[in-house]
Amino acid sequence: MEQMSGLITELQQYYSDFGAVAADPSLLDRLYDEDVIFCDPVHRVEGLPALKRYFAGMNGGLTSCRFEFDRSVMGGGSACLPWQMHFSHRQLNKGKPLTLRGCSLLHYRERVYYHEDFYDLGAMVYEQVPLLGTMVRGLKKRLGGAGS
């Protein structure tokens, strides 16, 4: 168990400065299995080379990105990691900082072989586009008030 909690700690340290991916994607070799499956609300990628390309592409518009992790839950080769992502992107919110809450589900042995991120894509992207953002926020408000 100590080795596995070490893996999760190393993964959290890695994501605490996500910009390091662009500088040295080989860091992923220590964390992820060669046959890793990575899923988020936007993509599903299979294999470590594809994951490296995906992360490198994500860094294209980011001016900063870091994760803060809340208390994680681990057991039986799985971990649930709640987080807050603090980021700035040239095309979102006029480049000003944004915060997004989410959670990662990991399955691992020696390294992570399955990683799925859960977050509100609307909060990340759609609400930051001027006209579309107004519509999405209005819809959320109406749906939230429907049960009142």
Image (tube, rainbow, N blue to C red):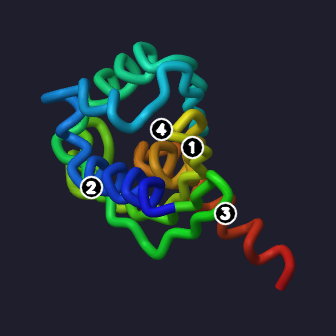
Residue plotted at (66% across, 69% down): 141
CB-based contact (under 8 Å), mark 3 and mark 4: no
In the picture, the disc for residue 134 is none
Q: Is residue 88 left or right of residue 30?
A: left
CB-based contact (under 8 Å), mark 1 and mark 4: yes
Q: SS of the residue at dot 4? A: loop
> In the current view of this chain or complex, which residue is farthest to the front?
2
CB-based contact (under 8 Å), mark 2 and mark 1: no
Please say if 15 is above or below 73.
above
Q: Position of residue 2 (x, y in %)?
A: 44, 62
Q: Is residue 107 left or right of residue 4?
A: right
> In the current view of this chain or complex, which residue is farthest to the left?
23
Q: CA distance from mark 3 to mark 4?
A: 39 Å
Mark 1 Cα within 10 Å, few/some/many (few <14, many 20+)? Answer: many
Which of disc 4 and disc 2 is earlier in sequence?
2
In the picture, the disc for residue 111 is 4
In the picture, the disc for residue 13 is 2
**On-image quarter of the C terminus:** bottom right
In the picture, the disc for residue 140 is 3
Q: Nearer the viewer, mark 3 or mark 4?
A: 4
Which of disc 1 and disc 2 is earlier in sequence?
2
Residue plotted at (67% across, 63% down): 140
Q: Nearer the viewer, mark 2 or mark 4?
A: 4
Q: CA distance from mark 2 to mark 3?
A: 34 Å
Q: SS of the residue at dot 1? A: strand
- Which residue carries the number 1 mark? 108
